[in-house]
Image (cartoon, rainbow, N blue to C red):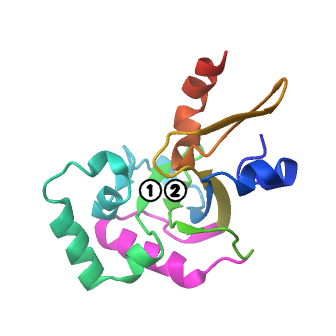
Amino acid sequence: CTGADLESLFPEVFRDSPLVKVKLQMMRTAPQPGGWRMGPALAGELTLTHYEAFEACPSLPALRARIEAETPWFPEWGIHVMMSQNGLGELVIGDSHVYGPTHDPFLDEQINQYILDYLWEMAQAPAPAVTERWYGVYAKTPGEVAFIRQPLAGVTILTGLGGAGMTLSFGVAETLR
């Protein structure tokens, strides 16, 4: 699986596909001191505007309008703020979503700062300093769960799971058996 880079292996399949490349930025802190644990993962109200599962919420249009009026850069950069803690005690913080055919290889520190400013208004941690920053690029298939094609005998392309690849990959793989 080449993830978002399908065009390297099958440029004609990628060209004719609905796939969109999405760049996201994330951060991580050092392990929190003294064995401090945050408990369940945390997501702010911005997350309600990001995931299609919340589209049925009757208050979503009002929330979306308020966010766009107060902080227009959040929708512009696809920012929704989440934090979880891994087994080492590090806090994993994210993220942003920029959609397009190509992306530059640089992190936008202003986007990271928007995420951190919002996060630290709703959460606290003993050691909040960020020690690592990175970006990733994934493929998304608008309006579909996945992009599946068989360009050659014995070759199946399965990509475009969007931001749910880790969640859906095993279930989708079962359907291909």
Q: Residues within 10 Å of mark 1 (few under 14, many from 20)?
A: many
Q: What residue is rendered at 27% in x and 75% in y?
A: 67
Q: Determine which residue is flagged by label 1.
A: 83
Q: What residue is rendered at 54% in x and 71% in y?
A: 129
| Outermost residue, top side | 177
What's under tag 1, amino acid-wise? Met
Residue 164 drawn at (x, y percent): 52, 43
Q: Determine which residue is flagged by label 2.
A: 91
What's under tag 2, amino acid-wise? Leu
Q: Secondary structure at mark 2?
A: strand
Left or right position of 152 against 99: right
Residue 8 drawn at (x, y percent): 85, 54
Q: Are marks 2 and 1 in contact (CB under 8 Å)?
A: yes
Q: Which residues are magenta?
A: 106-132
Q: What residue is rendered at 44% in x and 69% in y?
A: 79
Left or right position of 4 against 125: right
Left or right position of 18 against 14: left
Pick the residue in front: 130 or 19: 19
Q: What residue is rendered at 50% in x and 61% in y?
A: 93
Q: Is residue 74 magenta?
A: no
Pick the residue in front: 174 or 124: 174
Q: Hey, which quadrant is residue 152 in on the image?
A: top right
